[in-house]
Image (tube, helix red, strand yellow):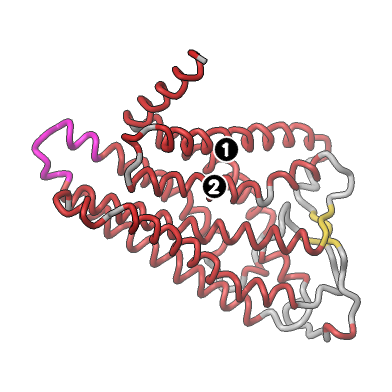
Amino acid sequence: MADQVIDSNNCSRVMEFILLGFQDIGRMNIILFIVVLLFYLLCITGNSLIIVIVRVDRRLQTPMYFFLSNFSVIEMGHTSAFMPKLLVNLLSEEMTICFNCCMVQFFFYFLCGVTKFFILTLMSIDRYLAICQPLRYSTIMTPSLCIKLALAAWFGGFSSIIFQFVRLVRLPFCSSNIIDHFFCDIGPMLRIAGGDTHLIETLFFLLVVALVLTSLFLTMVSYTFILSTVLHISSTTGRQKAFSTCISHLIVVSILYGAVIFIYLRPTVTHASFSIIKVVAILNMMVSPVLNPFIYTIRNNEVKQALRKVLGRKRRH
């Protein structure tokens, strides 16, 4: 389809798409619906709880938890971009999505997805400054700078995808309306699009390479310096606390980067095996957002104490 040129003025654009989703599971739809709903509720609850406890506990109103709160907002937005529609489709015989809804889903899914990498990079740099430059940390990571960095991350996410989004919306979708996925992902959409899709596919690949590899490089460099500094800490308690914080971040990074590299880091996303990608995508999109709150809270004594404080208040009221 990518090589087929269709004049958008001489075709009747489709008004809705059919999402194939997991069409081979048959009567397992109800089970999958329950599983997806459970993970979605856990994601929303867990990440909302992080935002609440950071807001109510002054001890957690630091750059580290400020960026963690932003990360939680992104996780909820990322999953909410596709999970509600997936849940509806799992209970419906007609797994359809309107054209405009599909484009909105695509936009917010990739906006949150790209912004997530910027925030993760900021979190790694923040940890580097806190551990490797402790005397200068408070003067560098001021509240105003943290807000500016968070806004820059969101702007970076927006500016990174807006051109691809505009190009995608303008493509003629005339010959087919069947998307071989459970949401409006770029690969399956470009496969059924008419017109010349080489430019948007090339730019998307370059975006993934630049964003993912640069973010991964900066994160690995930060943690190389962090590891070197931690090993020279004389206090065993100090070493354990630093390791605990950093390991939590590295677990999140490993899950996210591994899935994204497998799904998107390929020159031709339209030629991928979508059956395998759908399995990896659903695991990454369901498991990772749910694990993040548990990873950060279970391994962090400050968050656990703040959580007990919040829950204690609720019981008294």
Image coords of residue 166 (percent x, y): 67, 75
**Label 1 secondary element:** helix
Q: Identify the mark at residue 316; answer none if there is no mark.
A: none
Q: Which residue is mark 2?
A: 75
Determine which quarter of the picture holds residue 215. bottom left
Q: Which residue is mark 1?
A: 43
Q: Which residues are magenta?
A: 230-242
Please give left or right for residue 145 compared with residue 174 in the image.
Answer: left
Please give left or right for residue 140 compared with residue 177 in the image.
Answer: left
- Amino acid type shown at disc 2: Glu
Main SS, magenta region, reads helix
**Label 2 secondary element:** helix
Image coords of residue 280 (percent x, y): 59, 50
Residue 165 in the image: above or below residue 10: above
Residue 243 in the image: above or below residue 278: above
Q: Tell me which residue sits at (40%, 37%) in the image.
A: 296
Image coords of residue 85 (percent x, y): 75, 47
Magenta stretch contains residue 239: yes
- For the residue carrying disc 1, how many other residues have a C-alpha within 10 Å: few (<14), some (14-19), or many (20+)? many
Q: Tell me which residue sits at (14%, 50%) in the image.
A: 135
Quadrant position of the N terminus in the picture: bottom right
Counting residues from the start of the chain, the first of labels 1 and 2 encountered is: 1
Q: Tell me which residue sits at (44%, 64%) in the image.
A: 152
Q: Check whether the beta carbons of the residues at disc 1 and disc 2 lie within 8 A of each other.
A: yes
Closer to us: 79 or 280: 79
Image coords of residue 262 (percent x, y): 53, 58
Residue 161 in the image: above or below residue 74: below
| Mark-to-mark CA distance, 1 and 2 | 8 Å
Magenta stretch contains residue 237: yes
Please give left or right for residue 8 compared with residue 52 in the image.
Answer: right
- Amino acid type shown at disc 1: Cys
Please give left or right for residue 101 compared with residue 14 in the image.
Answer: left
